[in-house]
Amino acid sequence: MKKFAFIGAGSFVFTRNIVRDLLTFPAFYDAEFCLMDTDPERLEAICECCQRIVTASNKPAKLTTTLSRKEALTGADGVLCTVFNGGIDIWRHDIEIPKKYGVDINVGDTRSVSGIFRALRNIPLMLEICRDIKKYCPNAVFLNYTNPMSMLCRAMQTYTDVEVTGLCHSVQGTVKMLAEWLEVPKEEIDYLCAGVNHQAFYLKLQRNGKDLYPLLREKLKNTEFYNKEIVRNNMFLNLDYYVTESSGHNSEYNPWFRKRPDLIETYCTHSTNWNPGLYAFSLNMRLEREGHWRDEIDQWLEENPVDQISLEKSEEYAANIFNARIGDHTPFLFNGNVINDGCIPNLPSDACVEIPVLADRAGYHKTFVDNLPAHLAILVNTTARLENLVVEAAMEKNRRKVFQAVCMDPLTSAVCSLDEIKQMTDELFEANKTYLGDYQ
């Protein structure tokens, strides 16, 4: 019997999806799913949903819950992580303080100035979890879903020897979206996607050996499709390769779309896949959702009686990877977050990149991708080197390096002077002092 520890099991959608996905593999029919969270009320509610999925599956798997990370990890074969250090009460400062300086954030969980401070809060927590894994389940396969993905994985993969990779659904999610637009079966699309998390590009997008990009360009002449994803459709038409993560995210990762109110109105307000693209909506939506999480779960329970629950596997990679590593060992190719080690030669060798990785009984095997197109390499190098600097600053608790990383952020530098960035960074350190401690 395999044991899976869910650290941060209060993630409603993610936890129930992965429990359901694992139950589609015979090797895990009798598994123990140990759900761990720091919020007992939320944990109980999530467990009720997952128990309904287990009951509907008619499998002998069992669910356990705990508030103790030690208890969850002890003896675990697989670990999944969806935690973060600091709730909406602190996250809102990552959005509201930059807004005062004209840096208009949309999502704020991966990069730009808000993603940097989220990384500073989360890196110590993730390293603690890795130390606990090493102590209580040293051979466990650890899959991380917590953002900011690249910076957290780079810290864990550089400063611990735990077997960890990071997963995101944007690669397979975007292929599914493009397949629907192009009216082709997604199973017939052959692609190569590489870069860094949320900023990886489809270097190849083909069907039966035929390039699909000309068809996509033709499709985007139709405003119905162009307006579905304005930012990344505009990026594709100008940069020639499609990017993985949604327009809302990508509008924050470059200097082109969010530096003036008129540009935000044109590119970011009406279709960012995080609608609308204005920070106030994003923040207010999260505040409202946080206050009504119980209603969301109650609604799901009401709409999903045992005899009507879908047991169809989701698009997430996690269960397939666990099956490849500790299940029936069927090899599985996925896009994972790993240290580059020359797989993309024109990105830093020590950066965390998102590339095709093969999982099997022996471990993870990285794919040599080759160089990114020169113009994409400029964009992605800025991101990768900036993220390396943030991780270095977090490990050294070096305030000056954090400030200099923010200075290099494309969106922040498009809007603010160096003196303004210094003042903004100081304000963010003050707002985060309970979580960050003393940075020198």
Image: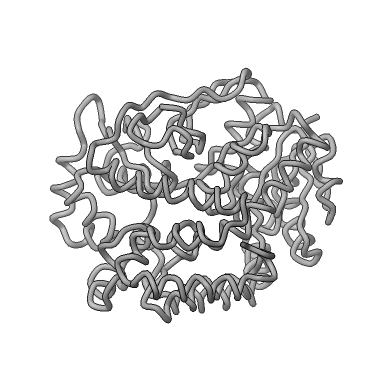
373 relative to 381 in the view: left or right: left
Q: Quadrant of residue 232?
A: bottom left
Q: Residue at x 23, y 24 (%)?
A: 209
As drawn, 295 above or below 382: below
Residue toward you, 319 or 86 = 86
Residue toward you, 175 or 281 = 281
Q: Residue at x 41, y 27 (%)?
A: 342
In the picture as drawn, the residue positioned furthest to the bottom comes out as 100
135 relative to 423 in the view: left or right: right
Quadrant where the image shows the C terminus: bottom right
Residue toward you, 197 or 409 = 409
91 relative to 178 in the view: left or right: right
Q: Quadrant of residue 88?
A: bottom right
Q: Residue at x 62, y 41 (%)?
A: 156
Q: Residue at x 36, y 77 (%)?
A: 102
- Across and down, in percent, residue 214 comes to 15, 40
As drawn, 371 above or below 130: above
166 relative to 41 in the view: left or right: left
- Across and down, in percent, residue 305 comes to 68, 57
- Across and down, in percent, residue 27 comes to 70, 27
Quadrant where the image shows the N terminus: top right
- Across and down, in percent, residue 124 comes to 67, 53
As drawn, 409 above or below 208: below
* Colouring chosen for the image of the structure: one colour
Total numbered circles: 0
